[in-house]
Amino acid sequence: MTELFLYQTVHVCGGQPRLVEAHAARLTEAARTLFGCRYAPDVRQLEARIAAAAKAERYPQSVSGFVRIELTADGAERLCGGGVSYYDGYALRSLRPDACAVCYDLPMAELPTSARETATLLARRQAELAGAETAIRCDHDGICHTADDAPLFAVRGTTVCTTPAPPSVERTLALRAIEAARLELSEEPLAREMLPRMDELFYADHRGITALAHFEGIPYMALIAERVAKAMEELFG
């Protein structure tokens, strides 16, 4: 039996969950839109329950951990362990995957559903068959949207480019970090044929920033990605 649910992954650093109010708001909106149900948790209580879930997972205090909030179609909430990080806080991850383009559309638009998560896994499998680790999602017009399930950003000089998209917690955080790093932001459709002319490609998720090493054989740097990652963590300093 296939279960439909909504999800968000919360970053827990030093035992403290981050951006819980924003994650809850995202679930509230999606639950109303897709399920027609009400989800309105007390944010402070939710923070306490997430912290307790992280503690129950025995996450080390020296690095960050992650807790998933899953919300079923009948409005039932569950908290699940989402693994640990190698880093304390948001960071530029040392892992730099290779990527290729995979053309597909998401079910139910941009809502954070289990169907979206499954589509991402299938796209990643297609990327692996092509010799890459990450799938850059393109639509049928050749516009790039995400790297796997995370907002995609491209850098040319000191300008960070991204395709306009509905706000998510991770996208909003990345845009704040780009502004804090005093970089220029360009929100225009990012066409696939533009990627070879870019200096860097990176994506932002609950772990922080991941810079791509190659896109379809083309190498990229990670200097601006490092600045964005540093600015992201400093937002919580």
Image: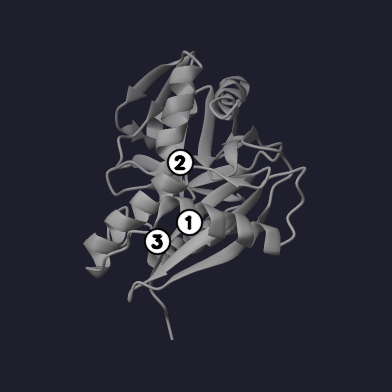
Q: Is residue 91 left or right of residue 34?
A: right
Local SS, label 3: helix
Distance of label 3 from label 2 (alpha carbons):
16 Å
Residue 164 vertical position relative to residue 7 in the rendered view, above or below? above
For the question of whether residue 193 can be seen, the reply is: yes
Residue 139 vertical position relative to residue 162 in the rendered view, above or below? below
Local SS, label 2: helix
Which residue type does callout 1 highlight? Gln
Is 153 in front, or is 100? 153
Q: Within 10 Å of the Cα at label 1, are there few (<14), some (14-19), or many (20+) other Cα atoms?
A: few
Distance of label 1 from label 3 (alpha carbons):
28 Å
- Residue reaching furthest bottom? 1
Distance of label 1 from label 2 (alpha carbons):
22 Å
Mark linked to residue 45: 1
Marks 1 & 2, CB-CB < 8 Å contact: no
Which residue type does callout 2 highlight? Glu
The residue beneath circle 3 is 116
Identified at 61% across, 42% down, the residue is 98
Which is nearer the N-term, disc 1 or disc 3? 1
Which residue type does callout 3 highlight? Arg
Q: Within 10 Å of the Cα at label 3, are there few (<14), some (14-19), or many (20+) other Cα atoms?
A: some
Position of the C terminus, as image quadrant, is top right
Identified at 31% across, 57% down, the residue is 28
Mark whose residue sits in front, 3 or 2: 2
Residue 104 vertical position relative to residue 192 in the rendered view, above or below? below
Q: Is residue 58 left or right of residue 104?
A: right
Which is nearer the N-term, disc 3 or disc 2? 3
Residue 189's spot in the image, x, y percent?
Answer: 30, 32
Local SS, label 1: helix
The residue beneath circle 2 is 170
Identified at 51% across, 17% down, the residue is 181
